[in-house]
Amino acid sequence: MFQEMREIVGVITGATSGIGRASALLLAQYGVKIVLAGRDEKRGQELQDEISSNGGSALFVKTDVSKYESVKNLMGKAQSTFGTIHYALNNAVLWLCASMSAHVNGDVIFIDGGSSLGS
């Protein structure tokens, strides 16, 4: 089973801390190629380096999930680097107040106070 995971490519948003970071580290141990998405460039690069230094494959792409073009860029870089994307773990949370919601491109579905973005 774990040998099969070496052919898998996953995109993780919110990968620079918390559950996203832990998920990236765990999946990388099993050989999953990870595309790390987050806003903190320093922590993202450090995580990419940590995964790479332990024999994994990772790419950090600075991403703001509230911006359509940023997400489009993320997925384009993921595909051009690793090919087929097998899964995406949307771990990033976007908090919106009513006045901000008019600025979101795409659909926003709120789940327990957080959000899930789709386009």
Image: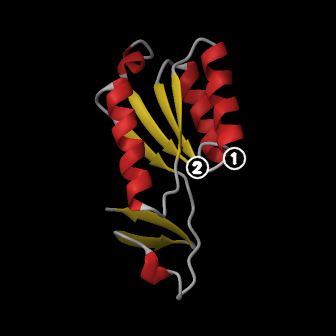
Label 2 neighbour load within 10 Å: few <14, some 14-19, many 20+: many
- Asked if 52 appears above or below 78 in the picture, the reply is above
Residue found at x 70% / y 30%: 46
Between 47 and 4, the one lying in front of the other is 47
- Asked if 80 appears above or below 3 in the picture, the reply is below
Residue 106 image point, x, y percent: 34, 69
Give the residue at the far bottom of this rendering. Answer: 99
Residue found at x 36% / y 19%: 7
Residue 33 image point, x, y percent: 46, 24
Give the quadrant of residue 68. bottom left
Separation of marks 2 and 1 at Cα, in angstroms = 8 Å
Between 6 and 61, the one lying in front of the other is 61
Give the total of numbered labels.
Answer: 2
In contact (CB < 8 Å): disc 2 and disc 1: yes
Q: Is residue 19 left or right of residue 67?
A: right
Q: Which residue is mark 2?
A: 14
Residue found at x 65% / y 14%: 54
Helix or strand or loop: what does disc 1 sit on? Answer: helix
Q: Which residue is mark 1?
A: 18
Q: Which mark is residue 1?
A: none
Mark 2 is on which residue type? Gly
Between 10 and 41, the one lying in front of the other is 41
